[in-house]
């Protein structure tokens, strides 16, 4: 369980995150939604200790993330940021191998190799595993990065806008994979997402942020609601129910 | 060709060049010439290796292949120290001063300067590496201007002696200093081995490194100190020649086409030795000491740098 208590973050006197408390259950997909500058990425970066918090407590399975050893934490939680500007000459397989670093410290064992194979197969990258990252399309590169996260084999997976710059087909593919990871492997996934329809269709819980504060959190059906969305985005959003799915019409 | 065979070929070429340098045209007083040349070769291997190694680590930390540790301002500080001694105490003092004292003073100040710089910049949460580089560059320019200022004030004859220190030269390397440098570099390398495994991961960038469990700030601070010590030692031993690093490390990346630091470090070290040994050979046999090695290295390095800029430019 990820547990945040009264978390604050200030950049140059501007409050980015203000008094955020929330609990995230195991084995669920939780989406963070909200307008630009709401603090979604900051929050997810703090949970994955990429940025330090100013105040409050963040614990994962009861352990404070700042007290836990870096290497132990890397086996428990992984993050995929939105900009993956790696300027190294790396093949997909080499990138995925990096996911094993917390376990192998650079010396890959048999077990590591089989985990890497698994991750590559899981993301259907087997045929192109020896291609270099700069030869790939955006969708393939994103899948390669997700394969690395799978190889890292952490209970908690954090993704910062994983659908950025992807077309519909690839977006759906990625979201289905994430769903599968939760259902089949019992992972817990937290993601920042802009498209509220993707959030509505694939997540169990939604946390809505605005101006660094939580406006609403709860089950997807509670948050995807006309009044709540009006509060978050300051616009009227029609919600249609199609095949038990709530689709927001905001055009 | 595999990484291994390429590395071995480089090692062999470096070794052969070392032998050529030592045994070429061996006549006259062999008992004097042989140890004299051997110690020079040893100094070349040491400094070449140290600079190449420090540059690889520095480029990895900064995630940038056209930055060398010279942006930390250590070269300029070295020149400032040398000029300052001449300015205050006169050229005779610099000439008379025992090599060890000058060496230790230079290293001491350079390392102290880097530590203060890091300490100041890494205080609290602000640990932006580019901010460090910016400050290093500004201070480097400041030292450079201050050096120029003192140089125009001193007597032209004294200036000649100060200027002599401005260019790297292996012609009159001090034997005792070479041994001292070996000890320092060996200690630094022993310390480095603890952080070796992190280099490949750090090359992925800060966020990825933290994600994969690298204690990033801790490791980067230690690595920067290692870089500073190595650059200080090689600068104090043969003079400012960090530009060499840019050249050899980029050549190593071009040649090896891998991200693995094991091969990149080894091949840059060997290429660096080849460049220095070859350069020194040309200085002695072709130019008969009419120029210094750093002039040659800077000339070739400068051309390569322009080539690199043009090539990278095309990519956009």
Image (cartoon, grey):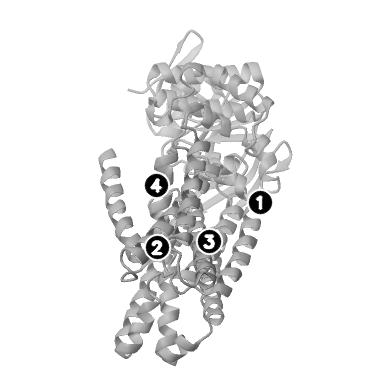
Residue ranking furthest to the front: B28
Q: Residues within 10 Å of mark 3 (few under 14, many from 20)?
A: many
First in sequence, mark 4 or 3: give its number.
3
Look at mark 2 in the image and give the residue it sits on: B280
Circle 3 chain: B
Q: Where on the picture, by quarter, is residue A139?
A: top left
User: For the residues marked 4 and 2, what is the alpha-carbon distance in whole angstroms?
Assistant: 19 Å
First in sequence, mark 3 or 2: give its number.
3
Look at mark 4 in the image and give the residue it sits on: B251
- Mark 4 against mark 3, which lies toward the viewer? 3
User: For the residues marked 4 and 1, what is the alpha-carbon distance in whole angstroms?
Assistant: 27 Å
Look at mark 1 in the image and give the residue it sits on: B194
Residue ranking furthest to the top: A243
First in sequence, mark 4 or 1: give its number.
1
Can you say which quadrant of the picture contains the C terminus of chain A?
A: top left
Look at mark 3 in the image and give the residue it sits on: B46
Circle 2 chain: B
Circle 1 chain: B
User: For the residues marked 3 and 2, what is the alpha-carbon distance in whole angstroms?
Assistant: 14 Å
Q: Residues within 10 Å of mark 1 (few under 14, many from 20)?
A: few
First in sequence, mark 2 or 1: give its number.
1
Is label 4 in contact with label 3 (beta carbons under 8 Å)? no
């Amino acid at each position: 369980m990820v547990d945040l208590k009264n978390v604050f973050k200030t950049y140059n006197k501007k409050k980015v995150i203000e008094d955020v408390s929330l609990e995230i259950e195991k084995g669920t997909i939780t989406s963070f939604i909200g307008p630009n500058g709401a603090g979604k990425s900051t929050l997810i970066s703090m949970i994955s200790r990429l940025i330090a918090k100013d105040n409050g407590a963040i614990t994962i399975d009861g352990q404070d993330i700042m007290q836990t050893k870096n290497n132990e934490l890397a086996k428990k939680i992984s993050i995929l940021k939105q900009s993956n500007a790696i300027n190294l000459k790396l093949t997909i397989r080499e990138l995925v191998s990096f996911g094993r670093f917390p376990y192998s410290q650079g010396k890959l064992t048999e077990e590591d190799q089989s985990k890497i194979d698994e991750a590559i197969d899981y993301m259907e990258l087997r045929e192109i595993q020896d291609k270099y990252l700069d030869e790939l399309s955006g969708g393939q590169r994103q899948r390669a990065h997700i394969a690395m996260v799978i190889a890292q084999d952490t209970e908690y997976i954090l993704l910062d806008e994983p659908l950025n710059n992807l077309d519909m087909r690839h977006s759906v593919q990625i979201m289905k994979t994430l769903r599968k990871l939760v259902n089949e492997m019992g992972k817990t996934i937290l993601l920042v997402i802009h498209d509220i329809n993707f959030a509505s269709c694939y997540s169990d819980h939604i946390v809505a942020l605005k101006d660094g504060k939580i406006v609403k959190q709860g089950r997807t059906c509670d948050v995807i609601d006309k009044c709540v969305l009006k509060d978050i985005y300051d616009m009227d959003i029609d919600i249609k129910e199609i095949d038990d799915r709530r689709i927001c019409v905001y055009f | 060709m595999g990484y291994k065979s390429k590395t071995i070929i480089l090692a062999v070429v470096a070794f052969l060049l070392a032998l050529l340098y030592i045994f070429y045209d061996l006549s006259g007083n062999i008992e004097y010439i042989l140890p004299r040349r051997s110690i020079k070769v040893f100094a070349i291997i040491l400094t070449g290796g140290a600079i190449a190694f420090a540059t690889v680590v520095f480029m990895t930390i900064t995630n940038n292949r056209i930055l060398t540790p010279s942006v930390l301002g250590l070269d300029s500080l070295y020149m400032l120290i040398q000029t300052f001694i001449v300015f205050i105490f006169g050229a005779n003092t610099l000439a008379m001063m025992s090599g060890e004292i000058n060496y230790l003073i230079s290293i001491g100040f350079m390392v102290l300067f880097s530590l203060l710089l890091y300490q100041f910049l890494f205080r609290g949460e602000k640990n932006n590496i580019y901010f460090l580089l910016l400050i290093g560059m500004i201070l480097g320019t400041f030292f450079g201007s201050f050096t120029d200022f003192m140089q125009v004030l001193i007597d032209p004859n004294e200036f000649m002696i100060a200027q002599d220190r401005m260019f790297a030269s292996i012609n009159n390397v001090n034997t005792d200093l070479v041994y001292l440098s070996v000890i320092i570099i060996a200690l630094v390398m022993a310390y480095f081995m603890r952080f070796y495994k992190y280099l490949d991961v750090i090359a992925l960038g800060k966020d990825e490194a933290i994600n994969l469990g690298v204690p990033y700030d801790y490791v980067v601070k230690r690595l920067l100190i290692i870089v500073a010590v190595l650059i200080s030692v090689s600068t104090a031993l043969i003079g400012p020649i960090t530009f060499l690093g840019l050249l050899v490390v980029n050549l190593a990346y071009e040649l090896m086409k891998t991200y693995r630091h094991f091969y990149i470090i080894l091949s840059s070290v060997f290429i660096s030795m080849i460049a220095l040994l070859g350069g020194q050979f040309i200085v002695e046999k072709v130019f008969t000491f009419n120029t210094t090695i750093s002039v040659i290295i800077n000339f070739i390095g400068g051309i390569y740098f322009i080539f690199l800029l043009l090539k990278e430019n095309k990519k956009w």
